[in-house]
Image (cartoon, grey):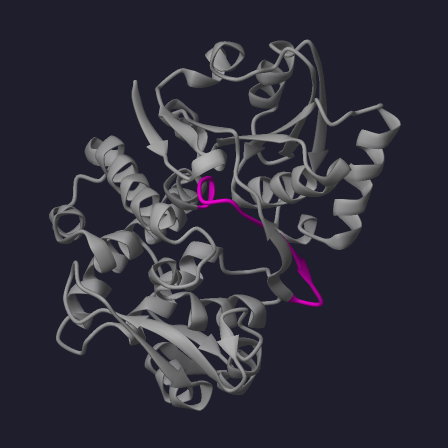
Amino acid sequence: MNVLHMNLGADSYEIVIERGALKRAGERLDLDRRVLVLTDDGVPREYAATVAAQAKDGCIYTVPQGEDSKSIARFGEILSRMLALGFSRRDAVVAVGGGVVGDLAGFVASAYMRGVDFYNIPTTVLSQVDSSIGGKTAVNLDGIKNIVGAFYQPKKVLIDLDLLATLPDRQVSNGLAEAVKMALTSDEKLFELFEKGNIKDNMDEIITRSLMIKQRVVEQDEKELGLRRILNFGHTIGHGIESFEHLNGLYHGECVALGMIPMVSVDLRPRVIKVLESLRLPTSVELDADAVYAAMTHDKKGEGDTVTVTTVPRPGQYEMKKVRFSDLYPLIQVIGRAS
Protein backbone atom coordinates (compact mmCIF):
# COMPACT_ATOMS: atom_id res chain seq x y z
CA MET A 1 0.00 0.00 0.00
CA ASN A 2 1.21 3.47 -0.92
CA VAL A 3 -0.40 6.54 0.65
CA LEU A 4 -0.08 10.05 -0.73
CA HIS A 5 -1.12 12.97 1.45
CA MET A 6 -2.89 15.86 -0.24
CA ASN A 7 -2.01 18.80 1.98
CA LEU A 8 -4.77 21.41 1.70
CA GLY A 9 -5.19 22.57 5.28
CA ALA A 10 -8.66 21.74 6.58
CA ASP A 11 -9.45 20.02 3.27
CA SER A 12 -6.47 17.65 3.37
CA TYR A 13 -6.99 13.98 2.56
CA GLU A 14 -5.25 10.72 1.79
CA ILE A 15 -4.91 9.03 -1.59
CA VAL A 16 -4.58 5.32 -0.87
CA ILE A 17 -3.01 3.26 -3.68
CA GLU A 18 -3.65 -0.37 -2.86
CA ARG A 19 -4.56 -3.44 -4.85
CA GLY A 20 -7.70 -4.97 -3.36
CA ALA A 21 -8.71 -1.70 -1.67
CA LEU A 22 -12.32 -2.02 -2.86
CA LYS A 23 -12.87 -5.07 -0.66
CA ARG A 24 -11.45 -3.15 2.29
CA ALA A 25 -13.43 0.04 1.73
CA GLY A 26 -15.15 -0.38 5.10
CA GLU A 27 -11.73 -0.29 6.78
CA ARG A 28 -10.38 2.63 4.76
CA LEU A 29 -13.49 4.86 4.71
CA ASP A 30 -16.08 5.94 7.30
CA LEU A 31 -19.09 3.99 6.04
CA ASP A 32 -20.80 3.60 9.43
CA ARG A 33 -23.73 5.75 8.27
CA ARG A 34 -26.15 6.19 5.38
CA VAL A 35 -24.16 6.04 2.13
CA LEU A 36 -25.20 6.70 -1.45
CA VAL A 37 -22.98 4.72 -3.82
CA LEU A 38 -23.14 6.39 -7.23
CA THR A 39 -22.07 4.32 -10.23
CA ASP A 40 -22.95 3.83 -13.89
CA ASP A 41 -24.17 0.86 -15.90
CA GLY A 42 -20.79 0.43 -17.58
CA VAL A 43 -19.09 -0.41 -14.27
CA PRO A 44 -19.29 -4.05 -13.11
CA ARG A 45 -22.27 -4.21 -10.74
CA GLU A 46 -20.29 -6.03 -8.07
CA TYR A 47 -18.02 -3.01 -7.53
CA ALA A 48 -20.78 -0.76 -6.18
CA ALA A 49 -22.42 -3.71 -4.40
CA THR A 50 -19.16 -4.47 -2.60
CA VAL A 51 -18.99 -0.93 -1.22
CA ALA A 52 -22.69 -0.72 -0.32
CA ALA A 53 -22.47 -4.02 1.57
CA GLN A 54 -19.76 -2.55 3.81
CA ALA A 55 -21.87 0.49 4.75
CA LYS A 56 -24.22 0.67 7.71
CA ASP A 57 -27.02 1.73 5.37
CA GLY A 58 -25.85 1.60 1.77
CA CYS A 59 -27.92 2.27 -1.32
CA ILE A 60 -26.85 2.24 -4.96
CA TYR A 61 -27.83 4.81 -7.59
CA THR A 62 -26.89 3.81 -11.15
CA VAL A 63 -26.81 6.29 -14.03
CA PRO A 64 -26.39 5.49 -17.73
CA GLN A 65 -22.81 5.35 -18.92
CA GLY A 66 -21.50 8.40 -20.75
CA GLU A 67 -21.29 12.19 -20.64
CA ASP A 68 -25.05 12.61 -21.05
CA SER A 69 -25.41 11.63 -17.37
CA LYS A 70 -23.50 14.75 -16.35
CA SER A 71 -26.59 16.90 -16.72
CA ILE A 72 -28.53 19.33 -14.56
CA ALA A 73 -31.53 17.01 -14.81
CA ARG A 74 -29.62 13.97 -13.54
CA PHE A 75 -28.00 16.08 -10.81
CA GLY A 76 -31.47 17.07 -9.59
CA GLU A 77 -32.78 13.51 -9.72
CA ILE A 78 -29.98 12.25 -7.48
CA LEU A 79 -30.54 15.04 -4.96
CA SER A 80 -34.25 14.22 -4.91
CA ARG A 81 -33.44 10.57 -4.28
CA MET A 82 -31.18 11.45 -1.35
CA LEU A 83 -33.88 13.66 0.11
CA ALA A 84 -36.49 10.90 -0.24
CA LEU A 85 -34.16 8.45 1.50
CA GLY A 86 -33.70 10.83 4.42
CA PHE A 87 -30.01 11.64 3.95
CA SER A 88 -28.63 14.07 6.52
CA ARG A 89 -25.49 16.21 6.64
CA ARG A 90 -23.78 13.39 8.56
CA ASP A 91 -24.13 10.96 5.65
CA ALA A 92 -21.91 10.41 2.61
CA VAL A 93 -21.66 9.91 -1.13
CA VAL A 94 -19.21 7.43 -2.67
CA ALA A 95 -18.33 7.50 -6.37
CA VAL A 96 -17.54 4.09 -7.87
CA GLY A 97 -16.75 4.64 -11.52
CA GLY A 98 -14.86 6.80 -13.96
CA GLY A 99 -14.61 10.53 -14.44
CA VAL A 100 -18.28 11.05 -15.24
CA VAL A 101 -19.36 9.36 -12.02
CA GLY A 102 -16.72 11.14 -9.95
CA ASP A 103 -17.61 14.58 -11.34
CA LEU A 104 -21.32 14.02 -10.83
CA ALA A 105 -21.05 12.44 -7.37
CA GLY A 106 -18.71 15.16 -6.14
CA PHE A 107 -21.03 17.93 -7.33
CA VAL A 108 -24.01 16.20 -5.71
CA ALA A 109 -22.09 15.88 -2.43
CA SER A 110 -21.05 19.54 -2.59
CA ALA A 111 -24.65 20.73 -2.97
CA TYR A 112 -26.74 18.44 -0.76
CA MET A 113 -27.43 20.32 2.48
CA ARG A 114 -24.50 22.58 1.51
CA GLY A 115 -22.07 19.69 1.59
CA VAL A 116 -21.80 16.08 2.76
CA ASP A 117 -18.73 13.84 2.86
CA PHE A 118 -17.54 12.54 -0.50
CA TYR A 119 -15.28 9.57 -1.23
CA ASN A 120 -13.94 8.62 -4.63
CA ILE A 121 -13.13 5.10 -5.82
CA PRO A 122 -12.11 5.52 -9.47
CA THR A 123 -12.42 2.50 -11.74
CA THR A 124 -10.78 3.75 -14.96
CA VAL A 125 -7.22 4.69 -15.83
CA LEU A 126 -8.30 8.25 -16.65
CA SER A 127 -9.97 8.80 -13.30
CA GLN A 128 -7.19 7.07 -11.36
CA VAL A 129 -4.41 9.19 -12.85
CA ASP A 130 -6.26 12.49 -12.95
CA SER A 131 -9.89 13.33 -12.24
CA SER A 132 -10.31 11.46 -8.93
CA ILE A 133 -8.14 13.96 -7.05
CA GLY A 134 -8.06 17.73 -6.98
CA GLY A 135 -11.66 18.54 -6.13
CA LYS A 136 -13.05 19.57 -9.52
CA THR A 137 -16.70 18.55 -9.74
CA ALA A 138 -19.13 19.51 -12.48
CA VAL A 139 -21.92 18.78 -14.92
CA ASN A 140 -22.36 19.83 -18.54
CA LEU A 141 -24.83 22.43 -19.82
CA ASP A 142 -26.07 23.15 -23.34
CA GLY A 143 -23.34 21.06 -24.90
CA ILE A 144 -20.52 22.77 -22.97
CA LYS A 145 -18.44 20.40 -20.87
CA ASN A 146 -18.07 21.01 -17.10
CA ILE A 147 -19.47 24.53 -17.25
CA VAL A 148 -21.47 24.20 -13.99
CA GLY A 149 -19.69 22.88 -10.92
CA ALA A 150 -17.69 23.50 -7.77
CA PHE A 151 -14.32 22.87 -6.18
CA TYR A 152 -15.12 20.23 -3.56
CA GLN A 153 -12.40 17.98 -2.20
CA PRO A 154 -13.05 14.32 -1.34
CA LYS A 155 -12.45 13.05 2.17
CA LYS A 156 -10.36 10.17 0.81
CA VAL A 157 -9.57 8.52 -2.52
CA LEU A 158 -9.02 4.77 -2.97
CA ILE A 159 -6.95 3.75 -6.00
CA ASP A 160 -7.39 0.00 -6.58
CA LEU A 161 -5.43 -1.03 -9.67
CA ASP A 162 -7.16 -4.42 -9.68
CA LEU A 163 -10.31 -2.65 -10.90
CA LEU A 164 -8.61 -1.88 -14.21
CA ALA A 165 -8.58 -5.56 -15.21
CA THR A 166 -12.08 -5.35 -16.71
CA LEU A 167 -11.43 -2.23 -18.79
CA PRO A 168 -11.50 -2.42 -22.60
CA ASP A 169 -8.19 -1.56 -24.27
CA ARG A 170 -9.63 1.68 -25.68
CA GLN A 171 -10.54 2.90 -22.20
CA VAL A 172 -7.03 2.12 -20.97
CA SER A 173 -5.56 4.17 -23.80
CA ASN A 174 -8.07 6.95 -23.11
CA GLY A 175 -6.79 7.29 -19.56
CA LEU A 176 -3.14 7.02 -20.47
CA ALA A 177 -3.52 10.18 -22.57
CA GLU A 178 -3.81 12.13 -19.31
CA ALA A 179 -0.69 10.42 -17.97
CA VAL A 180 1.18 11.44 -21.14
CA LYS A 181 -0.06 14.97 -20.49
CA MET A 182 1.44 14.89 -16.98
CA ALA A 183 4.71 13.50 -18.30
CA LEU A 184 5.10 16.13 -21.01
CA THR A 185 4.70 19.08 -18.66
CA SER A 186 6.35 17.74 -15.53
CA ASP A 187 8.21 14.42 -15.73
CA GLU A 188 10.72 13.70 -18.50
CA LYS A 189 11.48 10.23 -17.12
CA LEU A 190 7.80 9.30 -17.24
CA PHE A 191 7.62 10.39 -20.88
CA GLU A 192 10.70 8.29 -21.63
CA LEU A 193 8.92 5.36 -19.96
CA PHE A 194 6.10 5.78 -22.47
CA GLU A 195 8.62 5.89 -25.31
CA LYS A 196 10.16 2.59 -24.15
CA GLY A 197 6.81 0.78 -24.12
CA ASN A 198 5.91 -2.10 -21.76
CA ILE A 199 2.99 -0.05 -20.47
CA LYS A 200 1.16 -2.91 -18.76
CA ASP A 201 4.24 -3.93 -16.79
CA ASN A 202 4.70 -0.34 -15.60
CA MET A 203 1.08 0.61 -14.90
CA ASP A 204 1.61 0.93 -11.14
CA GLU A 205 4.49 3.35 -11.65
CA ILE A 206 2.64 5.33 -14.35
CA ILE A 207 -0.41 5.85 -12.14
CA THR A 208 1.58 6.66 -9.00
CA ARG A 209 3.91 9.13 -10.75
CA SER A 210 0.93 10.82 -12.44
CA LEU A 211 -0.87 11.18 -9.11
CA MET A 212 2.24 12.63 -7.49
CA ILE A 213 2.48 15.28 -10.21
CA LYS A 214 -1.13 16.32 -9.79
CA GLN A 215 -0.82 16.21 -6.00
CA ARG A 216 2.09 18.65 -6.05
CA VAL A 217 0.32 21.01 -8.44
CA VAL A 218 -3.01 21.04 -6.55
CA GLU A 219 -1.27 21.61 -3.22
CA GLN A 220 0.30 24.76 -4.65
CA ASP A 221 -2.76 25.99 -6.53
CA GLU A 222 -6.03 24.42 -5.40
CA LYS A 223 -8.40 26.80 -7.20
CA GLU A 224 -6.55 27.02 -10.53
CA LEU A 225 -5.32 30.59 -10.19
CA GLY A 226 -1.87 29.89 -11.58
CA LEU A 227 0.25 26.73 -11.65
CA ARG A 228 -2.71 24.35 -11.82
CA ARG A 229 -3.37 25.59 -15.33
CA ILE A 230 -0.60 23.28 -16.54
CA LEU A 231 -3.03 20.41 -15.91
CA ASN A 232 -5.13 21.87 -18.70
CA PHE A 233 -2.36 21.23 -21.22
CA GLY A 234 -4.08 19.98 -24.37
CA HIS A 235 -7.53 20.75 -23.01
CA THR A 236 -8.38 24.05 -24.69
CA ILE A 237 -8.38 22.58 -28.18
CA GLY A 238 -9.29 19.16 -26.76
CA HIS A 239 -12.46 20.43 -25.12
CA GLY A 240 -13.34 22.24 -28.32
CA ILE A 241 -13.11 18.96 -30.20
CA GLU A 242 -15.05 17.17 -27.47
CA SER A 243 -17.87 19.71 -27.57
CA PHE A 244 -17.91 19.57 -31.37
CA GLU A 245 -18.34 15.83 -31.10
CA HIS A 246 -21.51 16.61 -29.12
CA LEU A 247 -20.05 14.74 -26.14
CA ASN A 248 -20.13 11.48 -28.11
CA GLY A 249 -17.83 9.64 -30.49
CA LEU A 250 -14.38 10.47 -29.16
CA TYR A 251 -13.53 9.92 -25.51
CA HIS A 252 -12.16 12.71 -23.33
CA GLY A 253 -8.60 11.38 -23.31
CA GLU A 254 -8.66 10.96 -27.07
CA CYS A 255 -9.64 14.61 -27.44
CA VAL A 256 -6.88 15.66 -25.04
CA ALA A 257 -4.38 13.60 -27.05
CA LEU A 258 -5.37 15.52 -30.17
CA GLY A 259 -5.28 18.82 -28.27
CA MET A 260 -1.70 18.26 -27.07
CA ILE A 261 -0.16 17.83 -30.50
CA PRO A 262 -0.43 21.48 -31.65
CA MET A 263 0.80 22.70 -28.24
CA VAL A 264 4.22 21.02 -28.29
CA SER A 265 7.22 22.33 -30.17
CA VAL A 266 7.62 21.34 -33.80
CA ASP A 267 10.75 19.38 -32.89
CA LEU A 268 8.96 17.42 -30.16
CA ARG A 269 5.81 16.76 -32.18
CA PRO A 270 7.05 13.58 -33.96
CA ARG A 271 7.99 11.97 -30.63
CA VAL A 272 4.60 12.80 -29.14
CA ILE A 273 2.75 11.48 -32.17
CA LYS A 274 4.77 8.25 -32.02
CA VAL A 275 3.87 7.74 -28.34
CA LEU A 276 0.19 8.47 -28.97
CA GLU A 277 0.12 6.08 -31.91
CA SER A 278 1.75 3.36 -29.77
CA LEU A 279 -1.11 3.82 -27.30
CA ARG A 280 -3.64 3.62 -30.16
CA LEU A 281 -4.73 7.21 -29.59
CA PRO A 282 -5.83 9.45 -32.48
CA THR A 283 -3.36 11.95 -33.93
CA SER A 284 -5.72 13.51 -36.48
CA VAL A 285 -9.49 13.77 -36.81
CA GLU A 286 -12.10 14.91 -39.29
CA LEU A 287 -13.53 18.12 -37.95
CA ASP A 288 -15.14 21.44 -38.70
CA ALA A 289 -12.54 24.00 -37.58
CA ASP A 290 -15.15 26.74 -37.22
CA ALA A 291 -17.33 24.57 -34.94
CA VAL A 292 -14.36 23.54 -32.80
CA TYR A 293 -13.24 27.16 -32.55
CA ALA A 294 -16.73 28.29 -31.49
CA ALA A 295 -16.76 25.67 -28.73
CA MET A 296 -13.25 26.69 -27.60
CA THR A 297 -14.37 30.25 -26.95
CA HIS A 298 -16.58 28.94 -24.13
CA ASP A 299 -13.47 27.74 -22.29
CA LYS A 300 -13.91 28.38 -18.53
CA LYS A 301 -10.30 29.56 -18.44
CA GLY A 302 -10.96 32.26 -21.00
CA GLU A 303 -10.84 35.95 -20.20
CA GLY A 304 -12.79 37.77 -22.88
CA ASP A 305 -11.06 37.06 -26.17
CA THR A 306 -7.92 35.65 -24.52
CA VAL A 307 -7.01 32.42 -22.76
CA THR A 308 -3.94 31.17 -20.89
CA VAL A 309 -2.50 28.10 -22.57
CA THR A 310 0.33 25.74 -21.72
CA THR A 311 2.91 24.78 -24.32
CA VAL A 312 5.72 22.24 -24.04
CA PRO A 313 9.08 22.90 -25.72
CA ARG A 314 10.58 19.61 -24.48
CA PRO A 315 9.47 16.81 -22.10
CA GLY A 316 9.36 17.94 -18.49
CA GLN A 317 9.28 21.65 -19.33
CA TYR A 318 6.33 23.92 -19.89
CA GLU A 319 5.52 27.52 -20.67
CA MET A 320 2.28 29.33 -19.86
CA LYS A 321 1.23 32.31 -21.90
CA LYS A 322 -1.86 34.35 -22.60
CA VAL A 323 -2.98 34.28 -26.22
CA ARG A 324 -5.97 35.39 -28.21
CA PHE A 325 -8.42 32.66 -29.12
CA SER A 326 -7.93 33.70 -32.73
CA ASP A 327 -4.25 32.73 -32.44
CA LEU A 328 -5.32 29.15 -31.74
CA TYR A 329 -7.48 28.83 -34.84
CA PRO A 330 -4.58 27.86 -37.16
CA LEU A 331 -3.42 25.23 -34.65
CA ILE A 332 -6.70 23.35 -35.06
CA GLN A 333 -5.59 22.61 -38.62
CA VAL A 334 -2.54 20.73 -37.29
CA ILE A 335 -4.72 17.80 -36.26
CA GLY A 336 -7.78 18.47 -38.44
CA ARG A 337 -8.89 16.73 -41.58
CA ALA A 338 -11.50 18.66 -43.56
CA SER A 339 -15.03 17.36 -43.02
Residue 309 shows in the view? yes
| Residue 289 falls left or right of residue 220 | right
Most distant residue in the front direction: 9
Within the magenta stretch, is there residue 140?
Answer: yes
**Residue in view at x 53 percent, y 34 percent:** 154
Which residue corresponds to the image point at 80% horizontal and 45% vertical from the top-left?
76
Of residues 317 and 126, the one nearer the viewer is 317
Residue 19 falls in image quadrant: top left
Q: Is residue 26 above or below residue 197?
A: above
Image quarter of residue 274: bottom left
- Residue 312 found in image quarter: bottom left
| Residues in magenta, as a range | 131-143
In the image, is 158 to the left or to the right of 263?
Answer: right
Q: Can the viewer see residue 64 in this picture?
A: no
Q: Whole-percent x and y of residue 91?
A: 70, 23
**Residue at 33 percent of width and 60 percent of height:** 227
Residue 45 vertical placement versus 67 (above, below)? above
Say if the magenta span includes residue 103.
Answer: no
